Image (tube, coloured by chain):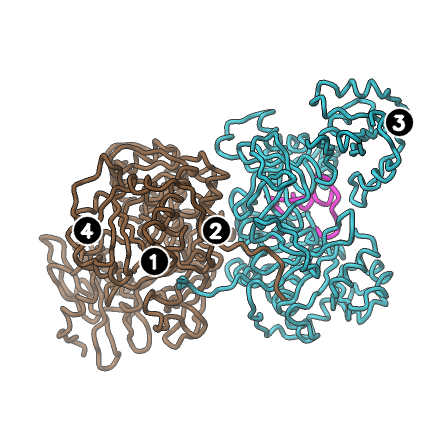
Chain colours: A cyan, B brown
């Protein structure tokens, strides 16, 4: 027997409708790509999003079509998302940090019919447009006055483009499971994989994001998402901020310390979200200029592990740090570092130990860690296993790879991470599954060994990879870049590590190199490193 | 094109699973019906809810069956809800304040197969059980030691009943639109009407309730819902409190000032929710005993309009008052009195004027006011019209009256209230639609006239009804009960009102009576009053 409640599908335009009606005058402030600070509000953002929808329909864009955006966080990018999804089309966020050939690859894979792009990226697309034949038109996110001379196909300034319709338009009706957004993961191996969000998953994730113990979004807030919209929905903020009616502050292209600091202060920002690299730039700016924060009261840090010194920097200034973890396939928030009531009395190092973990699962994210046979492992904070997740805003398939099963028999998605979960439910990533070293049926965390090795005063960088071993399957090899002008003795290095880890975790050998290969995003490229050492044989083998 | 996110239905047991896994040790504290304070936690509540589910299945209860609960807010009642819905059956909350014959009527209408009831209500059901043949078994929410001698059919103590199974049970799988809860409205006219909540609507409403600007539920909170679970899901708290992992404090049968005050203080309650009558008892207790509140920081007041003096009482003590409005058909929250950012600077009377309104619509509640032809009226705070609402947790039909259309052509449900909405979006109920006086095509609020009339020092109670008029269709008649020993002159009364309202709002006549009829819940029974005056003719007619 079904309930008798209204059929009110969870559609993204309900969010901007609510924002416009209940918080119509609430400001949306952007550091524009053209330079000046731009001010609008939710009423105008909705009105213009309706024009985008109407204009797309005029161009023949319909339900299910993909429209690419290659853009910073601005009010126009926000309008574009609500407009695109308002006709049932799909915003495909292209990450400008990809190599040009990768951009062409994903545009072709997505078969984007149009692209809305910032001035910044016109040269980039001019260079690859010949490889992107599906794109019928390029809309430059600017006005006529700033429109550059460009050879981009059917190029038009966004302001001109939306001025061609009158805005007398109604959002389309469709199922809440309709595709809304497409974001490709930039894996280090194989082709990029497209995650296809739905209206339902995005609206539910916005509600999850609004929760007091997740991002705690309120109409009283002024919120600056520095994390880009092309990074998995700006961690839900593109939806949860208008949903709650908070003031929205958008940084445009300038993510340097001085620019971010200025926006935080002039716009009374209370909540901001970014990766550690961005916070580091802010910290350096503040320290160099001896300036302090006056309105910020909490930050969300995610994307990669947050160093304790960063947590301390903010908390000393009365800014609560929420360490979050997630991934593109998870919309993206999976865990948040909110302190549970039973830990409320923790202080100092004990508190920091919890805050440095990735946090606990939010509602509608189920989590488990398993061994290689998919048996659940205990939440004891010690045993680590493959981290798997389940929920309404988590991928079940990749776009155009629908025949590939990516869930286990219980419906969990394998994150590719290896993690522990402690008795309080706090998860800590210990490694990438493909980097973990499998020795005699047990797992050794390469990251733990690396963190230990870089603690040596003469080590600039360290990487650990598994090397084939006849008896143990794999054993750890430690690869080290010594600090300039320093030399390190192999045995002294091992002695430095001895006693700080389990005996059987000790690397079997140490190799010294001048350089360790990195990925485009600055992480250690273990794939390449393993290749470099493919002929290497352990002395113990 | 559909998105590729996981099919993770919004089911109520996901809430208690999350609470048990992430907040397993968090306390659930009850003033038990037997007397002592009882302590359990979410892990145990889930374990026992699983037993309820397993036990119901053993009794043959299956998807869609109705199971009545006639109970106060206790841990057992909470377990029962999650257990009943965990097999896809429907908890039917019976309001013990109904007349016995009404209880029999709704039990028969619902065709409840079992009833779980508190010790308090055993005599009540013994008196009417002959009229409730659909009930196969009565489960008394107590243990063997407290089990009374009773003639209730197949009566068994809850603790004995769930001890008959081992708890090795898995929740059932079903569609998220499956019926979960049934609650009858106690209208003053006609038969009670059943609102049939679904898993989806309850889970979504729990998320709406958790929002920072709705009830702001956090794991850090200790929450006491004094509003009963038989009043529309205890205003979402039966679901949003476990969802967020907050400490849950349940008052049992004792809602008097002393008992409530004791729980607030001993259990460190930070948030509580109740109707004005309950708060009045608490205020009287606190004033009589000269005691203060030490942990409470916010209260939600709803059910009927909250007097400004009550708001002041709490706010003087540092307790933020959130005035809320909703109805059974709305799950129930529709609006909340959170202060919007543009009003943050308001103080004193201006702030109170906003707080005394019913608040603004929360996300996923669309709202409009219309005239009799369903034209939308402006949000100017002056014009009042029929209040209509739309959303995923709002009824579209009543149970077993599925052929009766209750939505307008835009899919809005008519609340039966008449209201204004101001330019900031704050709604204020001005009357019940059936009580509003329609004079010459314009509407006059009976409540406004009553509020003005009771301001006269010699008036004990006042009611205004519309009386047929040949020229104006209806004109207002003021009915007054003078204070004991006082006499009021008709013309003096009208003179008292003159100048304080629009000329055409002035009552055409005043009648003095010894008593005004009331409903079971203490409201003025205008239906009966209109009947008493059915032969009355206005002097102006």
Residue A137 in picture, x, y percent from top left: 77, 70
Q: Which residue is disc 2 drawn over?
A: B207
Q: Nearer the viewer, residue B441 or A221?
A: A221
Depth check, mark 3 against mark 4: the one in front is 4
Q: Which residue is disc 4 drawn over?
A: B125
How far is disc 3 from disc 1 in space, using C-alphas?
75 Å
**Is B338 positioned to the left or the right of A140 in the image?**
left
Q: Are marks 2 and 1 on the same chain?
A: yes
Q: Which residue is disc 1 drawn over?
A: B65
How far is disc 1 from disc 4 in space, using C-alphas?
20 Å
Depth check, mark 1 against mark 4: the one in front is 1
Q: Nearer the viewer, residue B257 or B263?
A: B263
How far is disc 2 from disc 1 in space, using C-alphas?
26 Å
Depth check, mark 4 against mark 2: the one in front is 4
In the image, which residues are magenta?
A248-277
Q: Are marks 4 and 2 in contact (CB under 8 Å)?
A: no
Element under label 2?
A: helix
Q: Which residue is disc 3 drawn over?
A: A484
Q: Dot 1, how many residues are within 10 Å of its Cα: few (below 14), some (14-19), or many (20+)?
A: many
**Is B434 positioned to the left or the right of A429 in the image?**
left
Element under label 3?
A: loop
């Amino acid at each position: 027997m079904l309930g008798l409640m209204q059929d009110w599908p969870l559609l993204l335009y309900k969010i901007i409708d609510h924002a416009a009606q209940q918080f119509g005058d609430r400001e949306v402030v952007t550091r524009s790509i053209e330079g000046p600070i731009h001010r609008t509000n939710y009423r105008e953002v909705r009105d213009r999003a309706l024009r985008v929808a109407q204009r797309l329909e005029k161009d023949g864009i319909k339900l299910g079509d993909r429209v690419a955006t290659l853009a910073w966080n601005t009010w126009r990018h926000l309008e574009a998302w609500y407009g695109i999804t308002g006709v049932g089309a799909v915003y495909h966020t292209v990450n400008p940090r990809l190599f040009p050939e990768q951009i062409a690859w994903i545009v072709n894979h997505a078969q984007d019919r149009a692209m809305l792009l910032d001035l910044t990226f016109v040269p980039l697309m001019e260079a690859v447009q010949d490889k992107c034949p599906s794109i019928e038109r390029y809309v430059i996110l600017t006005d006529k006055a700033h429109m550059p001379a460009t050879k981009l196909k059917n190029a038009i300034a966004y302001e001109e483009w939306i001025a061609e319709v009158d805005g007398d338009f109604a959002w389309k009706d469709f199922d809440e499971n309709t595709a809304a957004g497409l974001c490709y993961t930039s894996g280090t191996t194989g082709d990029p994989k497209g995650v296809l969000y739905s209206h339902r998953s995005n609206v539910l994730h916005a509600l999850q994001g609004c929760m007091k113990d997740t991002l705690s979004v309120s109409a009283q807030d002024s919120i600056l998402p520095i994390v880009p919209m092309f990074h998995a929905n700006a961690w839900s903020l593109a939806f949860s901020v208008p949903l709650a009616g908070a003031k929205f502050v958008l940084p445009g292209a300038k993510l340097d310390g001085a620019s971010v600091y200025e926006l935080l202060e002039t716009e009374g920002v209370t909540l901001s979200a970014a990766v550690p690299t961005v916070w580091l730039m802010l910290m350096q700016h503040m320290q160099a200029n001896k300036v302090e924060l006056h309105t910020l009261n909490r930050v969300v840090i995610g994307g990669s592990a947050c160093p304790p010194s960063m947590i301390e920097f903010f908390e000393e200034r009365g800014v609560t740090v929420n360490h979050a973890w997630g991934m593109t396939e998870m919309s993206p928030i999976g865990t948040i570092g909110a302190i549970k009531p039973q830990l409320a009395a923790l202080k100092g190092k004990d508190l920091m130990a919890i805050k440095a973990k990735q946090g606990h699962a939010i509602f509608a994210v189920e989590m488990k860690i398993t061994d290689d046979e998919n048996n659940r492992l205990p939440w004891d904070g010690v045993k680590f296993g493959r981290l798997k997740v389940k929920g309404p805003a988590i991928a079940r398939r990749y776009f155009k790879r629908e025949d590939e099963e990516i869930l286990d028999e219980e419906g969990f998605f394998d994150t590719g991470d290896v993690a522990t979960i402690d008795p309080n439910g706090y998860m800590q990533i210990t490694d990438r599954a493909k980097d973990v070293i499998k020795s005699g049926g047990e797992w050794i965390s390469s990251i733990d060994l690396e963190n230990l090795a870089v603690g040596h005063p003469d080590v600039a960088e360290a990487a650990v990879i598994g090397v084939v071993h006849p008896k143990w399957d794999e054993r750890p090899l430690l690869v080290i870049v010594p600090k300039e002008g320093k030399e390190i003795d192999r045995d002294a290095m091992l002695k430095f590590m001895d006693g700080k880890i389990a005996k059987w975790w000790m690397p079997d050998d140490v190799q010294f190199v001048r350089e360790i290969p990195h990925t485009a995003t600055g992480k250690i490229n273990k794939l390449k490193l393993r290749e470099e050492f493919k002929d290497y044989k352990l002395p113990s083998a």
